Image (cartoon, grey):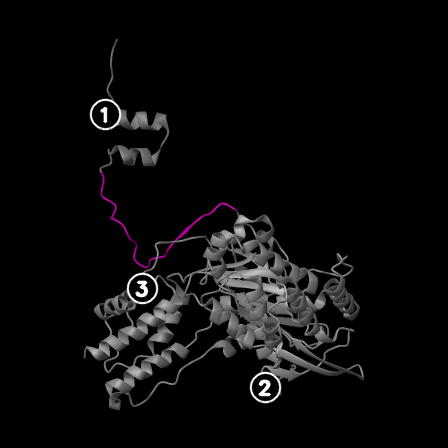
Amino acid sequence: MKKYQKQSGMTVDAEYGEEQGNPFFEALPEILGKEEVMKRLRSQIPYPKDIQKMSPEERRKEVMEISKWFYPMDYMYTIYDMLYRAMSATYQTKNIVDHIRQMNDLYMDFRTGREREFQYATQAYTGAVLGVPGIGKTSTVQRCLSLMPQVIVHTNYGGKPMYTKQINYLFVECPSDCSVRTLAFNIFSAIDRAIGSDYLKQATYQRAVAASATTTKLKIICMNHHIGLIVIDEIQNAIQTAVKNRQLKPLVKFLVELTNETSTGICFCGTMEAEDLFMSQEHLKRRTRGFRLLPLKYDVTYRKFITELWDSQVVLQKTELSEKLMKQIYDLSAGIPSYIVKIFQEAQVQAILTGKEKLSYEVLKQAIMCLGIEVPKTYGWSGTSISDFTVQEVTVNEEAVESVEIEVETTEETSLEGDCQEEISLDPVDGRRDKLDAENIMDEELPGSAEKTSSKRFYAVKRGRKKSERDDSDLLELWTENPSADALLLNLEQFHMLERRCF
């Protein structure tokens, strides 16, 4: 039986695995498989059976319930896997002795201001999840984190009393003013919400304290509560302020120090605007490797997404989801999941308000006008479509001591080749689909270039003028067939287009 199955809530009492002298690592929950994660991430809405009897006002209210609908995709399991390994890596980097040394160094630095000499492992995960707005980064990260207990309470380990609260993860928002003090206050607030402390009140009460003292206190608190991972959302908030006030370096320096001195993992989450910041500084390129997410392609993943969503119609006349309608919705939304859901919601509202009670392309266009949705034709940086992530589920059945049978569960739209191991197909940087072992993604340097490359948006129906018909003797056609000079001369001579002069 897996740990914490009998306990509910985000705070649980510690249950240890095999004793290794590291209670914080031993108390972590087991990593979940893809099937279990997908099942727990999915959020369906109950469909009212008496739609025909409901008033227009009641049905418009019912439309808002669609916001609670959540459809899991393979890339979400990839993010869950990354977050879990990032969190567990924090507790693997040091043992109890290392923890005591770090605490002592931080305390002595706070008291004397002397320079520290690291005598323990400082390696911790740092990465980023960036993507197009509306693609579902924040909701996915929050839902994936919710699958793990946030706080583990230790009271006894190895037959000896040990009382401490271990905070596995924190989710904070990057301050728009790019202030180190404000970010520290946000982390204090997140700690207070997790364990019911009053660190924020203490920090704000002492307004005369220098920012360096506040950050040192935060580092000590991170060590006291053994924080495994801090997710900083909306990291792009710092871009404009940083450029204007030149306050970026102190913030980045603080985060680097927090990671090195406390071995706490950091994961940035935001839009592609942050990529300009990360790629502009050499030391940030390595620390912010990770996922760069682009919208859905017009493929099987999109079809499954829109088909399941389409069942939530509350109009009186249900419209069948045709191929043409799927393409129209895709081109209007550019394959961005949030836009697809909002267009579907607003289209139903407009259909009910106008009395049409049926979804059509005209109603969808009207919904677009009401929402004011404008999708850019290109995205700032290249990345990987969320349709391109594929995860292969592997199960092992032991039929005998000497023989092991491995079963592979595949979906109709994805199949991977290779050895019997869980593989993830992704490329967070340049859009190429490389297969990386799931255990090595965090440790390998991903391919990329500092030069900015943009990605064009996807379309279900190709844009542009149709190719005009050309004669066989057309010069462009002849050049396309064979661009060599000799071949072009032969073709010109064949069609009597070569002018000869005699001198």
Is 459 a magenta residue? Answer: yes
Q: Which residue is mark 1?
A: 497
Which residue is depicted at the point 59% across and 56% down?
Answer: 250
Of residue 315 and residue 222, the one placed in the foreground of this image is 222
Q: Are marks 2 and 1 in contact (CB under 8 Å)?
A: no
Q: Which quadrant of the view contains residue 45?
A: bottom left
Q: Would you say residue 391 is visible in this rendering?
A: no
| Between 224 and 242, the one nearer to me in the picture | 242
Q: Which residues are magenta?
A: 450-470
In the rendering, at what x and y percent does residue 283 appear?
Answer: 60, 51
In the displayed structure, does residue 502 sit left or right of residue 301?
left
Amino acid type indicated by mark 2: Ser
Quadrant assignment, res 201: bottom right
- Measured in 3D between alpha carbons, the distance from the residue under mark 2 to the one under mark 3, in whole angstroms, is 40 Å
| Residue 8 image label | 2
Labels 2, 3: front one? 3
Quadrant assignment, res 78: bottom right
Q: Which residue is mark 3?
A: 373
Q: Is residue 222 visible?
A: yes
Q: Is residue 407 magenta?
A: no
Main secondary-structure element of the magenta-colored stretch: loop
In the rendered structure, which disc, 2 or 1, sits on the residue that comes first in sequence? 2
